[in-house]
Amino acid sequence: MKRKLITSAAFSSGAKFLSRVIGLISTLILARILTPTDFAMIAIIAIVIHLFDILSHTGAEQYIVQKSNVYDEDLNTAWTLDLLLKVLVCFLLVILAPFITTFFDKPELTIVIQVASTTLIFNALRTPGLLLLKRGLEYKKIFYLSLVQRIISFIIVIFVAFYWRNYWAFVVADMVGAIVFTIGSYRIHTYRPSLSLIKVSEQWLFSKWLLGKYIVGYLGSQVDTVLVAKFFGNIQLGNYHMARDVAMLPGHNIIGPAIEPLLADFKDYKNTPNKLGRRVSKVLCLVAFIVVPITSYMLLYPSLIIDVLLGKQWVIAGELLGVMSLLFFYYCFLLVIESALTAIGRVRVLFYFDIFSLILVVVTLLTYLQMFNDLHHTVWLRVLIGLTLTFLITMILHSFVPLKFIQIGITLVLSAGISGICLALSYWITMQIEIGQVMMLLVSGSIFCATYTVVTVTLLPMLMGTTLGNLIKKYR
């Protein structure tokens, strides 16, 4: 059983990793084919479709996986409820699309959103046999199917973007990917669903709180993009969208997946607050040693990073990336804090905090944008709100679990000081030689990473009385 669990985790993580890598490669290629205006349209389409997808989220996967025994009635009800809600939401989206695009002042997106909404139905038609595979920890088949889907979608989006040169490439690729995955799901599992609502009341009782949490969480994460789309032009929105994606790349693709296994044992200490506090504090220290240098590098070289990754047409994104790196900074700490609160059963506290955060962000940004029209100051305001909320939720966790603030503070100061020294050294060395931008990024990044690692390993035992390896060993 243990070996099967490890194998399943490896395939699940591998599927997510490959999906992110393919997505990253396609974004870097498309940034040179399409314009910031195209990416502004893509941002609006994605926000609308994903929001309506969440509005029809039934929590079928969580419902089926957590049940002790699963019968055909459970699977058929989950599949039917999901399909009916997706059809209803798709119908509503077709009707509301003109009003939504009028709100964003993008009437040309009406037909695009209506067509893109069909992906919701295609995804809902997948066989619920996939849930049985996940219950049985049989992720190998899902891994290969996901890989095939991502490769086909990648080929389609690049091919269509190259010939059409507009945002329709993403819509076509998403539709094809949804159809491929749905057809493939019936090839990798023999279960054939039928329409049934026998267990609908039981599932809705389980899913209703999940639905509320998903809606509030998604709105909180996307409200700033919605406001930028409303108050600024296409070029600013496209650059904002891409700068945010680049800033969050390390968080979504490296730090987030790395943190997940570290947090798995928090629940084992929920009845011993002091021990849990020490473990959470150690994780925060480990995160700081990784997050602070990455943030510092993005703060010093924002334009260089954007020019190399995206190209010369993303000038505004280069100006925004430095500030947006702070989004990545506090996002990583929020992952740890929220996981700890979840482990001690304070989910309701998190839900109310998410509502408070959403209201604060909307009211503050909306008030500012009614008076001023400065994108850079808007980004700074969003970052300051995020940092304040991160500090607030940390204090909320501290009221339940005593954290080691002195240890965390020393770690932050130490990692920031080491990052500053290493950045100064890498900057000085690269200024002594004449090289192109790509080599500049590679050389400065390599020097910075090497010197930061050496200095950290050397100074940490003297300044904190322990090594980074011992911190990890103690946590384990």
Image (cartoon, grey):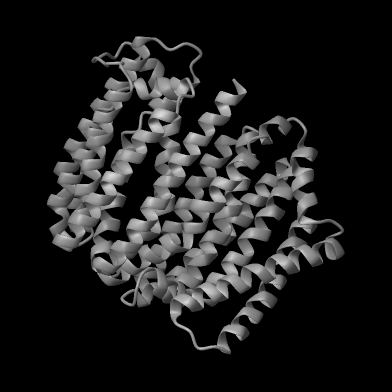
For the C terminus, the image quarter is top right
- Give the residue displayed 30% in from the left and 57% down from the top: 43
Q: Quadrant of residue 320?
A: bottom left
Using the rendered image of the protein, determine whether residue 229 is visible from the camera's viewpoint. Answer: no
Using the rendered image of the protein, determine whether residue 307 is visible from the camera's viewpoint. Answer: yes
User: Could you say which is closer to the camera, residue 471 or residue 352?
Assistant: 471
- Give the residue displayed 48% in from the left and 77% down from the top: 439
Above or below, 398 relative to 343: below
- Give the residue displayed 74% in from the left and 49% down from the top: 282
Q: Quadrant of residue 93?
A: top left
The spot of residue 464 in percent (x, y) is 84, 60
Image side of residue 402 versus residue 324, left or right: right
For the N terminus, the image quarter is top right
- Give the residue displayed 77% in from the left and 52% down from the top: 469
Image side of residue 129 versus residue 177, left or right: right
Above or below, 123 relative to 95: above
User: Could you say which is closer to the camera, residue 250 or residue 89?
Assistant: 250
Above or below, 390 relative to 183: below
Image side of residue 382 versus residue 112, left or right: right
Counting the numbered discs, the total is: 0
The spot of residue 45 in percent (x, y) is 25, 53
The spot of residue 160 in percent (x, y) is 18, 55
Above or below, 348 relative to 158: above
User: Could you say which is closer to the camera, residue 25 or residue 254?
Assistant: 25
The spot of residue 4 in percent (x, y) is 55, 24
